[in-house]
Each structure stands twice: as C-alpha cells, then as structure tokens.
Image (cartoon, grey):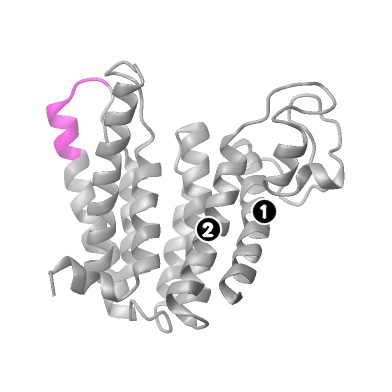
C-alpha cells in the first residue's frame, strides 16, 4: 500500500515533469498556470491537465481545437509513477527511495525532452551534476569522492566514444555532446561502478530500440534519441540499488 501511495506521488510529479518538458525547450516561463493547449492556447479544464487521466478523458485530442495530444506525455507520466512505486517497493522509506525518486523525476524529464525535441539541455544537466555532488553525502550509492570520480570517469569514457564517432562517421555523429553530459550526470548520481553499469544497460536499451525501429520499417538513417535509452538504463540501476553491482559481478 505504501508503494502504491508513493506511486501516486510519482503520478503527480510526472504531471509536473510533462509541464516543464513542454516549456523548458522553448524558454517559456515554468510558473504559468493553469496549463493551456499549445495549439489553440485555450485554458485546459482541471481534469484535462491531470496526469494520464486528462489524456484519456480527451481521448487523445484537445477538446477545444481537436488537435492530437502528444501520447509521449502520458507515457512519461505513467513511467514516473511506476518508478516511484518500484523504488518504494524495492527499498522502502529512506534516502535511496527519496533521493532516488528525485533523480528519477529529473531523468524522466531528460527522457521526455530528448524524445520530443532530440535535445539534452545544459540547463538540466549542469544543475543536476551539482545537485548530485551535494547529495552524495547522504545518498547510499555514493559518497563525495565516489560521486566526483564517477562524473569524471563516466563522462570521460563517453567523451572518448564521441570523438571515436567523429573519426569513424561522416555527417551526423551517432553520439552527441548531450549524451556525454548525461554520462557525467550518471556518474555523479551513481558513482563510477553503478554509473558505468547504467551506461552499459543504456547501450543495450539503445540497441533494442534501434532493432525495434528497423522492424517497424524505419530507415537506417532515422535519427534515434539515444538519451532516452541511456535514461532507461539509469532508472533500472536506481531501482535495483546497491545489489546491482553484486549482480553484475555474478555474486
């Protein structure tokens, strides 16, 4: 029951994530309320802006202008709620659940923005690194030195991948600097060991995503927002918690 209640908190936080993700890339103020339809600028009814519920009540279309609503918004809201519930179910009440939920909300924000706009924003990654370094004193997966080393090492590895991609590929590089900064975030949040594992899981998720796109008939040159796959790996690592490194070593 406690996990379900915490999932409801994640449901509400997911709604805030969706609102921030719909404004931050455009430089819009984050405090405007109530939300409006981006197409017709009509103010939404209270039930319409409820996470997931509003989308279902409107049957995927704005009740004012009939424009299609972005299905990625309720999907991310639902993922945020599920992550909060999973963290409580896995770890109970404590720093790992509370700080992990905060990290998860930020990661789902990165996920949604990258999925919709193919952007990983500095205004999200830079403050998150500083936040993770500050919280490393109390977060069970890290300590200050481990968090700092994780940020440097995870970011350094992905920076190497970025330059390797620049050498091997012409035109659009498969890995961008935004992904490098996201690796720094993972290292600061999780430390070097769990940060590396989050990146490995993200790479696997990216491979699955690429295969799925090909099976759906997408062209090989179709752009894939790689940050979404990396976020999935980090969220899985957060949910697994300290035991994931023992699992990784086969103990």
**Which residue sits at x=58%, y=50%?**
78
The residue beneath circle 1 is 16
Outermost residue to the front: 1
Q: Is residue 72 magenta?
A: no
- Local secondary structure at mark 1: helix
Instruction: Locate the C terminus by quadrant.
Output: bottom left
- Residue 34, placed above or below residue 82: above
Q: Position of residue 121 (x, y in %)?
A: 48, 45
Front one among 8 and 32: 8
Left or right placement of residue 140 versus residue 38 in this view = left
Tell me the mark number nearer the camera, choosing from 2 and 1: 2
Image x and y of residue 208, in percent: 28, 38
In space, the residues marked 2 and 1 are separated at their CA atoms by 15 Å
Q: Secondary structure at mark 2?
A: helix
Magenta span has 164?
A: yes
Mark 2 Cα-neighbour bin, 10 Å: few <14, some 14–19, many ≥20: some
x, y percentage for residue 19? 67, 46
The quarter of the picture where the N terminus appears is: bottom right
Decide which of 131, 201 is in the foreground and name it.
201
**What secondary structure prevails in the magenta region?**
helix
Q: Which residue is mark 2?
A: 82
Q: Which residues are magenta?
A: 163-171
Describe residue 78's horizontal placement relative to residue 152 as left or right.
right
Q: Nearer the viewer, residue 39 or 144?
A: 39
Residue at image position (47%, 61%) is: 128
Q: Which mark is residue 75?
A: none
Residue 16 in percent (x, y) is at 67, 53
Picture layout, residue 143 above or below residue 124: below
The reply to whether dot 2 and dot 1 touch (C-beta < 8 Å) is no
Q: Residue at x 56, y 72 (%)?
A: 3
Residue 210, above or below 49:
above
Image vertical order of residue 228 relative to residue 216, above or below: below
């Amino acid at each position: 029951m406690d996990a379900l209640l915490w999932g409801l908190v994640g449901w509400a936080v997911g709604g805030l994530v969706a609102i921030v993700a719909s404004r931050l890339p455009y430089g819009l103020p984050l405090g405007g309320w109530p939300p409006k339809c981006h197409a017709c600028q009509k103010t939404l009814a209270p039930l319409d802006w409820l996470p997931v519920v509003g989308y279902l009540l409107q049957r995927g279309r704005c009740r004012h202008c009939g424009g299609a609503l972005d299905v990625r918004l309720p999907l991310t809201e639902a993922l945020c709620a599920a992550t909060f519930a999973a963290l409580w179910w896995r770890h109970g009440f404590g720093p790992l659940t509370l700080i992990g939920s905060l990290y998860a909300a930020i990661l789902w924000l990165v996920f949604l923005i990258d999925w919709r706009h193919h952007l990983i924003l500095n205004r999200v990654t830079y403050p998150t690194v500083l936040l993770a370094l500050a919280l490393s004193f109390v977060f069970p997966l890290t300590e200050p030195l481990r968090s700092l080393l994780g940020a440097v090492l995870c970011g350094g590895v992905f920076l190497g991948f970025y330059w390797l991609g620049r050498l091997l590929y012409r035109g659009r590089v498969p890995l961008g600097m935004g992904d490098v900064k996201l690796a720094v975030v993972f290292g600061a949040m999780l430390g070097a060991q769990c940060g590396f594992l989050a990146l490995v899981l993200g790479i696997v998720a990216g491979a699955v995503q690429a295969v799925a796109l090909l099976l759906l008939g997408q062209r090989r040159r179709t752009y894939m927002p790689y940050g979404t796959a990396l976020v999935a790996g980090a969220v899985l690592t957060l949910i697994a918690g300290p035991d994931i490194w023992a699992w990784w070593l086969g103990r």
